[in-house]
């Protein structure tokens, strides 16, 4: 009879979880040892847990299957918390396995003792500490069931070391997946009635509504009824590009988002939360819903939003409407000294078919949407929860989920430094990731926020806190230090050449573009 | 009347908190802006919150005053959690100021919304969300009071953005410090009785008992009574070197620690917890207390352990006993190709008077204690809570607390990568830190743990998970990328020269020593 660790790994594999992102320690040593006895499980080593949790998120977004982590006690989970926050906001399934001290060791308050359940609770829909090796495999099945949903959630299973090492455990069979249902006929009727009412209506699409099937259904509705379509501010995964319905994302800055939604009488939420400003500002409203606009939820989080949109399309007799599709189109290939906008143009000019873009370019990326809209079809992954340091890990996970697709990480300098260790995992696993590092040597977004707060005359200390120069971060050295071929480019001509070569060659590459901060 | 942010910063400064380690965001923008109006506050920018919290710990250890952080919402606190765990274990005072959304924004569940109090609770003795700017300054005083103790604790004050920006706030005066009291006469009598009983006794010293006054009192007791002295396994700060009483630290591996304590009839805890193995192992006891050994607590955590030791010394008529002091002595200066042991010898041969050593060398550092014991007087700071990634941040904080003393960070490769962003803050602040990076290209300690678990025949996947080569991390590039003069050395001759030069020059230096893993 195998020990708990073996039964756990076997149970995960039998449920289809064949990749885990890890940074293990002594309390996980039995789980590590079990990996060689279950060859179907691929363990991807990260040098920091924030990389593991972000990679699990990126994997889940692209695989439509649970991303899994193996973490070391409370501090390991703590290190992974920010990207688990983002995963929770992305609504993807993530299963965390967190090692703990042996059950009998806990009362002794050893140095690494902490309250893991409390840490986990913040991001997890489900937390359980397994109590013995007999139950461990069934606990794992429960974790997978909760994580898989619908909707996708974060589930955290804490595994004491003795529960791992005790023999007599048995793997457990996976549970049946729950098929999500479309919205009720009453809901569809009510929403269809609102749209048919002839007033100004909009649909805010989120989650899986931003995949092709959902987009096409929504675009047919729009074509038949004049309803406007919007995408949520920070989608987990947006399918876009030539031949797909193009949907405008809700803007980050409140005044721009308000302008987008202005005048709507009805706003239909299709897989998205009610729109709200990212931060609060003195004297400004938090809600982005226009005054007098009525909000309708098309489908609950546990429902099938795509089927709901298709049912709505049928109810509106829109199935034969011709959806507006994005025509192919590339921006002109830029020349001359680099600016952030020219980098965005170069990316739009070169973005390959089937690319997966992990976008954490922040202020340097404002010109990305228009410049890439008509590029060949691709997936766009964004910073769902606002906890920066997600872009590089998500690229790791996406590349592992989709080894045949090129991954492009568009990455701001400040955010990159949170999980810079991701570069090493890209090198070790020889992932086909091209990192375009926008180095504007500033936390530029905070500069904008200072302006918005009407603190135009920032003193020297404030200025210093927003400035990432002094000394300048040298991302070519950082990339080289992690084993990735890295190059700095100064002109658009060189950028185009280097970007095309990086995409043509297998394995990871880093391209640092030093761009002005404004 | 100033706004809440200004009143808060002024209150911190008035209470003696004049340094904060930060990585701020939009919700802290008012606090950032207030920095220029309170020039006594020095804000040290870090690129990742784990650096900020570890630096606050290192600062508190050396300044004997609260270390302070300014963090960004739940994810920022989450990123700092591992080193707050270590700070909690170090028993040092830390005050976290964590920005939050405006109070009225919270119900809207914006992307960065999370339950900050829950995250904070894991490491904090005190958590409060300030409710309005009138109360903010008094809330800060309460936080400082709890943090200062005794004993030193972590206190977390959550500051919603509107509480920062509202006007009408007033700074609050600091509260009176609580002076810790020595142990009661009854306790002293009981402990003195145990020592006088003539059986084998030992004192386990921890916390402030490991500073000169405590060490000397304990050494006089030892000289007068034959009592053995031990230091806790991972001290926050151990004063040691030539001319101070030398105290053996409790070993990490259970069998070695058990051998140290074997045969004791009485164990007296002086500022230390009852000794326990770091991890649990199948079939082994968690407690390191020998069977039949009676444990006595000399002073409670909130008491003055040094005064208690001195009272015990008086009770034992040991005040005139001559304490055994460490004679001066340096190891021979090593030559030839480097090994971890030769690096430890070189450090012992060169360690300057008054140095502060931040030790996270893990397995590469096993030869450090004997090789540095007779070096000129210095402070030794260790990984108190076992959450790796603490060594470099603690060095940052120690260097800021003690700008006139050389700081040496003895750092293992695997742990370094958790908070490698520390290097940039060392460069920005031009801290006098010499980082000696032991690169053995492995999580060597896990290899040892595998052996201990009798899994001698680790398969290829397990081996890969413990191996940090493939690709090799290049710390010279990583240091250069963060703006630190960095050099790799291969021989002991070069190491000695480079180490002496690094210590002679102001500002940070990184020396990478590639050493065999075994």
Image (tube, coloured by chain):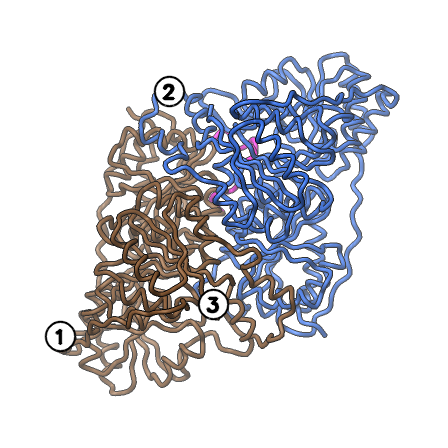
Chain colours: A blue, B brown
At 24% across and 48% down in the image, what residue appears?
B403
The segment highlighted magenta reads B103-118
- Marks 2/3: CA–CA distance: 55 Å
Residue A33 x/y as whole percent: 63, 68
The picture quadrant where one finds residue A109 is bottom left
Pointer 1 and pointer 3 on the same chain: yes
> Which residue occupies 80% across, 17% down?
A223
Give the residue number, with chain letter if any, for mark 3.
B516
Residue at horizontal 39%, vertical 47%? B423
Check disc 2: other Cα within 10 Å, few if <14, some if 14-19, many if 20+: few
**Whole-percent x and y of residue B155?**
37, 48
Where is mark 2, residue-wise?
Answer: A456
User: Which of the two discs, 1 and 3, sits closer to the camera?
Assistant: 3
Mark 2 vs mark 1, foreground winner is 2
Chain for disc number 1: B
Q: Is residue A258 visible?
A: yes
Labels 2 and 3 touching (C-beta < 8 A): no
Determine whether the residue tagged by mark 2 lies in a helix, strand or loop. Answer: loop
In magenta stretch: residue B107 = yes
Taking the image as shown, residue B341 lies to the left or right of residue A345, namely left
Residue that badge 1 annotates: B319
């Amino acid at each position: 009879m195998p020990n708990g660790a073996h039964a756990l790994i076997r149970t995960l594999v039998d449920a289809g979880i064949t990749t885990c992102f890890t940074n293990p320690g002594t309390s996980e040593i039995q789980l590590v040892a079990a990996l060689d006895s279950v060859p179907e499980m691929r363990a991807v080593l990260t040098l920091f847990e924030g990389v593991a949790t972000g990679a699990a998120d990126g994997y889940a977004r692209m695989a439509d299957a649970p991303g899994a982590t193996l973490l070391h006690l409370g501090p390991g989970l703590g290190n992974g918390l920010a990207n688990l926050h983002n995963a929770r906001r992305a609504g993807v399934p993530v299963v965390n396995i967190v090692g703990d001290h042996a059950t009998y060791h806990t009362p002794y308050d050893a140095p690494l003792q902490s309250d893991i359940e409390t840490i986990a609770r913040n991001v997890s829909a489900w937390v359980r500490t397994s109590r013995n090796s007999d139950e461990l495999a069934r606990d794992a099945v429960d974790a997978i069931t909760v994580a898989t949903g619908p909707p996708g959630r974060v589930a955290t299973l804490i595994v004491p070391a003795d529960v791992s090492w005790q023999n007599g455990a048995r793997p457990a069979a996976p549970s049946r997946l729950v098929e999500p249902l479309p919205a009720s006929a009453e809901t569809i009727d009510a929403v269809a009635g609102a749209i048919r009412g002839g007033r100004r209506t909009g649909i805010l699409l989120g989650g899986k509504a931003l995949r092709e099937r959902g987009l096409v259904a929504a675009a047919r509705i729009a074509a038949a009824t004049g309803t406007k379509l919007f995408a949520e501010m920070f989608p987990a995964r947006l399918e876009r590009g030539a031949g797909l319905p193009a949907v405008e994302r809700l803007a980050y800055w409140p005044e721009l988002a308000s302008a987008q939604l202005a005048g709507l009488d009805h706003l239909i939420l299709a897989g998205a939360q009610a729109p709200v400003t990212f931060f609060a500002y003195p004297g400004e409203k938090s809600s982005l819903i226009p005054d007098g606009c009525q909000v309708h939820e098309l489908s609950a989080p546990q429902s099938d939003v795509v089927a709901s949109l298709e049912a709505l399309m049928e109810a509106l007799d829109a199935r034969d409407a011709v959806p507006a599709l994005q025509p192919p189109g590339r921006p002109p290939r830029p020349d001359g000294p680099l600016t952030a906008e020219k980098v965005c143009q170069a990316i739009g000019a070169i973005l390959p078919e089937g690319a997966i873009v992990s976008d954490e370019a922040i202020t340097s990326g404002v010109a990305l949407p228009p410049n890439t809209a008509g590029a060949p079809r691709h997936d766009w992954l964004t910073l769902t929860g606002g906890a920066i340091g997600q872009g590089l890990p998500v690229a790791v996970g996406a590349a592992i989920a989709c080894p045949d697709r090129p991954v492009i990480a568009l990455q701001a300098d400040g955010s990159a430094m949170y999980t810079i260790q991701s570069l090493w995992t890209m090198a070790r696993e020889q992932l086909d990731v091209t990192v375009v590092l926008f180095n504007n040597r500033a936390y530029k977004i905070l500069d904008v926020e200072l302006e918005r707060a009407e603190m135009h005359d920032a003193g020297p200390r404030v200025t210093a806190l927003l400035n990432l120069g002094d000394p300048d971060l040298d991302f070519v050295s950082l990339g080289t230090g992690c084993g990735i071929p890295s190059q700095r480019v100064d002109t658009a001509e060189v950028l185009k050449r280097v970007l095309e070569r990086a995409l043509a060659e297998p394995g990871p590459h880093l391209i640092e573009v030093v761009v002005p901060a404004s």
